[in-house]
Amino acid sequence: MPLITDTIDLWLPPRIVEALHTHGKQLRVPHEVDGSRGQFRAPRTACLLKASSDYEARLNVA
């Protein structure tokens, strides 16, 4: 399972990766919305996941 910090090679099919590399495109999630600060989850009292970080939340979904 790829992590948010992994390269696109782990996220996308090879033909898409090749096309993006050919055209010099890079996909990057802005730090403000990458979930690293854990601000895009529901409040702990309303959240059904037992997670204290976005990484833990992602592991619970897998």
Image (cartoon, rainbow, N blue to C red):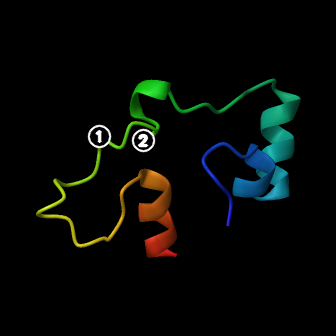
The vertical placement of 37 against 50, above or below, is above
Say if residue 1 shows up in the picture: yes
Q: Nearer the viewer, residue 56 or 14?
A: 56
Residue at image mark 1 = 39
Q: Nearer the viewer, residue 50 or 19?
A: 50
Q: CA distance from mark 1 to mark 2?
A: 6 Å
Q: Are marks 1 and 2 in contact (CB under 8 Å)?
A: yes
Q: Position of residue 40 (x, y in %)?
A: 29, 45
Q: Nearer the viewer, residue 8 or 36?
A: 36
What type is the residue that disc 2 sits on? Gly
Q: Position of residue 52 (x, y in %)?
A: 36, 57
Left or right position of 23 against 3: right
Residue at image mark 2 = 35
The vertical placement of 14 against 27, above or below, is below
What type is the residue that disc 1 sits on? Gln
Badge 1 marks a residue whose secondary structure is loop
Q: Residue at x 40, y 33 (%)?
A: 33
In the rendered picture of this protein, how many numbered marks are placed on residues? 2
